[in-house]
């Protein structure tokens, strides 16, 4: 991986909130490409860095299932062309 992709991967691993994710998308110029593909998908974002196509899929999940069905957890999946996917999970109440 090149330095820019390593920086992106490190920044992705440090996401701990919606604010961090918003900042990450701005810094690395991700744009929303598909807002709804399934009921648990909040958005799919893409960018291109150094001729590598990258996508982030943002999903929600409910931690308290029987008590209060709400999207209070978030899962992010980063896919970089030619590399292993990376996952990050953060909670809305942190």
Image: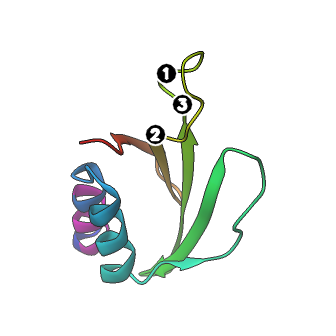
Disc 1 and disc 3: Cα gap in Å?
6 Å
Left or right, 91 with respect to 35, comes to: left
Q: Is residue 84 visible?
A: no
Say which quadrant the N terminus sits in: bottom left
Dominant secondary structure, magenta: helix
Q: Residue 26 or 70: which is nearer the viewer?
A: 70
Residue occupying the point 32% across, 70% down:
24
Residue 11: x, y in percent? 23, 61
Against 83, residue 34 (above or below) is below
Q: Secondary structure at mark 3?
A: loop
Residue 67: x, y in percent? 54, 18
The earlier-in-sequence mark between 3 and 2 is 3
Q: Which of the 4 image quarters holds residue 81?
A: bottom right
Residue occupying the point 27% across, 63% down:
20
Q: Is residue 7 visible?
A: yes
Residue 30: x, y in percent? 47, 78
Q: Which residue has dot 3 on it?
A: 62
Q: Secondary structure at mark 1?
A: loop
Q: CB under 8 Å between callouts 2 and 1?
A: yes
Reply yes or no: does residue 45 show up in magenta.
no
The earlier-in-sequence mark between 2 and 1 is 1
Q: Residue 68 or 26: which is nearer the viewer?
A: 68
Q: Which residue has dot 1 on it?
A: 64
Residue occupying the point 56% across, 37% down:
70
Q: CB under 8 Å between callouts 3 and 2?
A: yes
For disc 2, the neighbor class at 10 Å (few under 14, some 14 to 19, many from 20) is some
For disc 3, the neighbor class at 10 Å (few under 14, some 14 to 19, many from 20) is some
Reply yes or no: does residue 7 show up in magenta.
yes
Magenta-drawn segment: 4-10
Q: CB under 8 Å between callouts 1 and 3?
A: yes
Q: Which residue has dot 2 on it?
A: 72
């Amino acid at each position: 991986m090149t330095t820019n992709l390593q920086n992106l991967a490190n920044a992705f691993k440090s996401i701990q909130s919606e604010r961090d994710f918003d900042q990450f998308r701005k810094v690395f110029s991700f744009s929303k490409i598909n807002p709804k593909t399934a009921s648990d998908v909040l958005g799919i974002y893409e960018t291109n860095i150094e001729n590598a196509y990258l996508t982030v899929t943002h999903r929600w999940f409910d931690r308290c299932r029987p008590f209060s069905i709400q999207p209070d957890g978030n899962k992010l999946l980063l896919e970089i062309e030619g590399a292993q996917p990376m996952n990050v999970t953060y909670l809305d109440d942190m």
